[in-house]
Image (cartoon, rainbow, N blue to C red):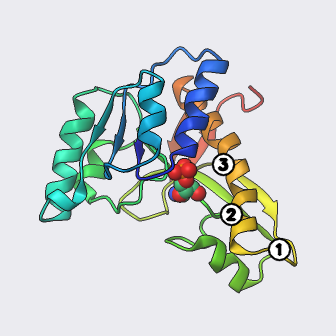
């Protein structure tokens, strides 16, 4: 799993994997920032951690190449971007095609990029949410695995709205990862099918 900071989505996935006794191991948690809070949680759980600091690399391509080596050392079946705040290059994304997921805090295709909660408040939408999607070279536009919606309330601030969305992220991201592990996800024509979705 790749993180950049707090790592609450990573924690939700780890805790769900434990609680539901997934037949999977969390191979590693890798951060692009040495000070990411989530690293301490991962270490405390006995999960291997690594830091590949983007500031140590002269270009995006150099960073992505180093990150790829660090990831592949752990030979994961799936790469989970959990609050990983870097734009990835096309060769990196291609290397993990079909086995790299991201969570984005909006109902895509609305509000890609940063500041999604502010974007939602500015647009005046009544419904906001989060999306788990396969990562493609097209930022925040890969095939959608699952979404959760929350109401936008009249007195919402960016913070209250973010907190409401985050609670849902912690539900849908572990569920999406479990579907991947259970081999329930298939992609055709840019659309994801979930086998036996009731599970
Ligand atoms: C989440 O809202 C995620 O959707 C976004 O960044 C935030 C990361 O939070 N990409 P955390 O690090 O998982 O706590």
Image coordinates for residue 90, horizontal then vertical, percent: 27, 58
Q: Is mark 1 within 8 Å of ligand 1?
A: no
Q: In the image as oriented, which residue stretches furthest toward the right?
A: 154
Q: Is mark 3 within 8 Å of ligand 1?
A: yes
Ligand 1 location (quadrant)? bottom right
Image coordinates for residue 179, horizontal then vertical, percent: 60, 30
* Mark 1, other Cα within 10 Å: few <14 / some 14–19 / many ≥20: few
Query: Is 191 above or below relative to 113?
Result: above
Mark identifier at residue 169: 3
Residue 63 located left or right of residue 188: left
Residue beneath label 2, please? 162
Residue under the point 18% across and 38% down: 69
Residue under the point 12% across and 65% down: 58
Report the mark closest to the observer, 3 or 2: 2
- Give the alpha-carbon distance from disc 3 to disc 2, as whole Å: 10 Å
Report the mark closest to the observer, 2 or 1: 2
Between 133 and 185, the residue placed more toward the observer is: 133
> Does the CB distance between marks 1 and 3 fall below 8 Å?
no
> Does the CB distance between marks 3 and 2 fall below 8 Å?
no
User: Which SS class for mark 1?
Assistant: loop
User: Which SS class for mark 3?
Assistant: helix
- Residue 103 appears anywhere in the view: no
Residue beneath label 1, please? 126
* Mark 3, other Cα within 10 Å: few <14 / some 14–19 / many ≥20: many
Residue under the point 64% across and 78% down: 118
- Give the alpha-carbon distance from disc 1 to disc 3, as whole Å: 18 Å
Quarter of the image with the N terminus in it: top left
Q: Is mark 2 within 8 Å of ligand 1?
A: yes
Residue under the point 86% across and 72% down: 153
Q: Earlier in the sequence, mark 3 or mark 2?
A: 2
Image coordinates for residue 78, horizontal then vertical, percent: 41, 33
């Amino acid at each position: 799993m790749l993180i950049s900071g707090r790592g609450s989505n990573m924690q939700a996935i780890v805790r769900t994997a434990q609680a539901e006794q997934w037949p999977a191991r969390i191979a590693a948690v890798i951060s692009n920032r040495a000070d990411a809070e989530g690293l301490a949680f991962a270490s405390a759980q006995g999960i291997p951690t690594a830091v590949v600091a983007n500031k140590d690399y002269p270009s995006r391509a150099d960073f992505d190449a180093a990150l790829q080596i660090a990831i592949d050392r752990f030979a994961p079946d799936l790469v989970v971007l959990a609050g990983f705040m870097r734009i990835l290059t096309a060769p990196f994304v291609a290397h993990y095609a079909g086995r790299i997921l991201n969570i984005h805090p909006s109902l895509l295709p609305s509000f890609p990029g940063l500041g999604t909660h502010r974007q939602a408040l500015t647009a005046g939408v009544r419904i906001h949410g989060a999306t788990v999607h396969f990562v493609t070279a097209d930022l925040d536009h890969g095939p959608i695995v699952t979404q959760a919606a929350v109401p936008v309330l009249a007195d919402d601030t960016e913070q209250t709205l973010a907190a409401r969305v985050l609670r849902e992220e912690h539900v849908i991201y572990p569920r999406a990862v479990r579907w991947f592990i259970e081999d329930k996800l298939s992609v055709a024509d840019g659309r994801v099918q979930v086998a036996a979705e009731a599970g």
